[in-house]
Image (spheres, coloured by chain):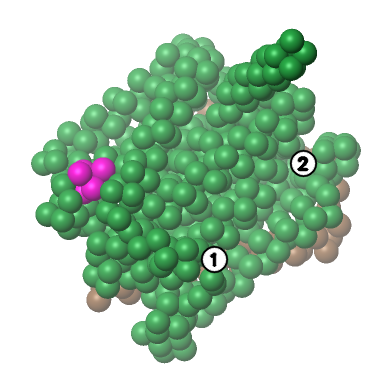
Amino acid sequence: MNILSSFYYRYRKLLKTIRLYLIIAGPGIIVMVADNDAGGITTYTATGAKYGFHLIWFLVLLGPIAYYVQEMTVRLGAVTKRGHAEAIFHSFGSFWGWFSLLDLVLVDWLTMITEFIGMTAAMSIFGVPPLVTVIVGWILMGTMVLQGRYWTWEKAALVFCGLNLIYIPAALMINPPVDKILHGTFIPQLPPGGFTNALFFLLMANIGTTIAPWMIFFQQSAVVDKGMQEKDMLWGKLDTAVGSFLTVVVATGCIVLTATLLPGQEINDAATAAFRFLPINHYVGAFLAIGLFDAGLLGAICISLASSWAFGEVFGWAHSLNHKVKEAPWFYAYYFFDLLLAGTVVLIPHAPLVLITLFVQVIAVTLLPAALVFLILLLNNEETMGEYKNTLFQNVANIGIVVMIIIISTLYGISALYPKILGG
Amino acid sequence: MIVDFFRNAAGGVRAINQKYTTPHIKMTRGVRFSLGVLRFYLLFLVGIMVYKFITTLLH
């Protein structure tokens, strides 16, 4: 009887723990999975086609890096109850605040364009015209936010996050070479050909799609809008860790797909990869297209919200998804304005959409250190953070990330001006 | 109407600047200078990337 009651007690405790986690879960998973947006899927498929399985280890390393950055936003949001934009204005003044806000607005808008590029490219595989895709995207994104509750929006976003995992069954369906995957995952290596400009560009794009400025603003504001408290931080961190794990798994799935089925082929975007998959395996091609549309949709939802929240925080508008349109008109107005502007660019004939997609990732990662430095400074302020301020290890890890990104961005800048330095 | 919109927006910006005149985290002159250098350096790098984008497009 004792064993039974002990088992029953443990079972009930486990259920309660899982239920509590599911209540708190949301911002971390959403931001990390949305991180595998249309630009990200494009980058991963291009990486797999060009370099095979050789760079999976690099993506695996980016997972913990993304976690250490995003985990800071959980603490900052839960303790200060302020979004990131407001936190910068409050702590550093209006000069640095405007700089950060305008950075965010520009990069977010450019990234939004890439999301619509991904969605239209994905649906073109099924013969859907871009105009129809853009309009359907607007309607879906509008419907999600207009029901006036953060929780409802979050649960809908989590459904789309689940759909984003479609790359995993797709990768399993093609019987990929497990030995090569394991070798590429656990043995750091350069692909044949060594360091070239093209490799550098893709490495930068991979970093830029894994850690982006909008993610910092989004997760912190989502934590505040969700009403997370300091006592919930452990669950918030677990949420972020689960999200970063899923990010790496999905990214690996994308690489495995193109590395297995399209090795050595020039793939500039995920839609091209999906087209080429169709004759090989119709389901895999369809899954990639659906996943690409989902990635673009999820990315667009989160990025436009990140900007809307930031503007609302700074301008003092009502800026919560718990407000209806009448209660927060400017918040929703900015959200829809962002969507309309980005979607319209995609409809411009002959726009260099693929080039835009890859370059935006690179620009985003270049501007990331500016956002990270403020985040680190905020997390080291004892007056604000108290016992939740950064530990020495966290400071070392995050400053290391900042330094690494600055060095890589500088090297890319040099290679852009003097292409022959790295060759090819 | 458009003039009123921009006038209101400018007023909003002035109000924000006034609200956040005094930073709550004291940064030394060295830290402020370093942040400024970092910021403009990163914008310089972005400028190089935009140049690369344009040249790639033209070719």
Disc ID at residue A159? none
Give the residue pinned by disc 2: A91
At label 1, counting other C-alpha atoms closer than 10 Å, the crowd grade (few under 14, some 14-19, many 20 or more) is few
State the residue at coordinates (84%, 60%).
B29
Q: Main secondary structure of the magenta part?
A: helix
Chain ID for brown: B
Visible residue check, residue A230 = yes
Q: Amino acid at mark 1?
A: Phe
Up/down of A247 relative to A236, above or below: below
> Element type at marker 2?
helix
State the residue at coordinates (39%, 40%).
A165
Q: Chain of mark 1?
A: A
Part of the protein shown in magenta = A283-289
Q: Amino acid at mark 2?
A: Ser
State the residue at coordinates (25%, 62%).
A261
Quarter of the figure that contains the C terminus of chain A: bottom left
Residue A164, by quadrant, is: top left
Left or right of A121, for residue A305: right
